[in-house]
Amino acid sequence: MTTRARWAEAVAARAAAHWTPTRTAELLRGKTVAVPPAEGAVLLRGLGILDDDGALPPARVGKYFQVNHMVAQLGPALAALRARHPVVRIVDVGCGRSYLTTVLAWCGAAVWDHRLEVLGIDRDADVVAESARRIDAIGLDDRVRSAVADLDAAAARAAWTARFGAVPDAIHAVVGLHACDRATCAAIALGVELGAELIAVAPCCQAELAQGWAALADAGVDGPFAPVWRTPHLRRETAADVTDQLRVLLLRARGYRTTALEFVPHEHTRKNTLVRATLDDDAAAATEAARQYAALVAATGGVGLALAARLAV
């Protein structure tokens, strides 16, 4: 038995002892999850969500439910991809430590019996190295790879070829979990450029629009939305919501059926919006979404997102 196998066996045994039916019921409170704490112990310990004794510390409960709920929210779209493709290929943009996509690959192997291949790309070499270490410990290194790469289509394809040893015939999904500010827009743009059938992002720290509004306030520009521009707290809070709506409209303008929804309750995290888009190619809906984008930008002061230019909307 290898060192990794012995470690995995010990983790599984400790988690099985810790997660009695009573403890599991207290944690889940009637929720159905893709990764129960005992069955997914090796995965969850490798990701640093469970402690070495199998326990789930209160500080990590939010992360546990976050990844489980996001898998559930992506479930129908992922099921459709599995029905169409013998191997589903996913790029995780701004992957960090690859929580979500490692869970997706694990579900492919342990729950869905379908091969999912995942490439995580990030500009931070340290987090990519940490991600690779965790993936190897979990035993998913044949399905999940990570690379330092720029967030554009050519770099993503090159990184895929380098890590998996073959040019991908298609990238089926692009996801970004809490990629900060414009990195979320980069994930959206990459998904569109790759022609991904599914794009899913959970935005974080949206600053671009708020900065534009702050510049209007500093310049003394007046308008119906000026009271929001001039109140820093409300400017930040409002800009985050408007940014997500603008992203939804831009995705619709590029032929995606797009929704924004809460993907984990507020008690676990305030950064809980999931923008989910599936390729639809409804020309009339795209034209209307482009009109609505321009109208919303005009109504809130004329400051749009750089993403619009990248998507040519």
Image (spheres, rainbow, N blue to C red):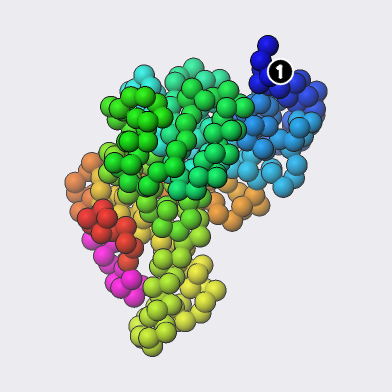
**Quarter containing the C terminus:** bottom left
> Residue lying furthest bottom in this view?
220
> Which is more toward the observer, 76 or 30?
76
> Residue lying furthest top in this view?
1
* Residue 192, image quadrant: top left
Which secondary structure lies at badge 1? helix
Asked if residue 6 can be seen in this view, the reply is yes
Residue at the location (56% across, 20% down)? 110
> Which is more toward the observer, 218 or 293?
218
Residue stretch rendered in magenta on the structure: 291-303
Asked if residue 299 can be seen in this view, the reply is no
Residue 55 location in percent, x, y?
77, 34
Instruction: Look at label 1 and name its amino acid.
Output: Arg
Residue at the location (48% across, 22% down)? 142
Q: On the picture, is 290 further left or further right than 258?
A: left
Residue 220 location in percent, x, y?
38, 88
Q: On the picture, is 161 further left or further right than 58?
A: left
Instruction: Name the magenta segment's main secondary structure.
Output: helix
> Which is more toward the observer, 72 or 117?
117
Q: On the picture, is 223 further left or further right than 230?
A: left
Residue 174 location in percent, x, y?
39, 39
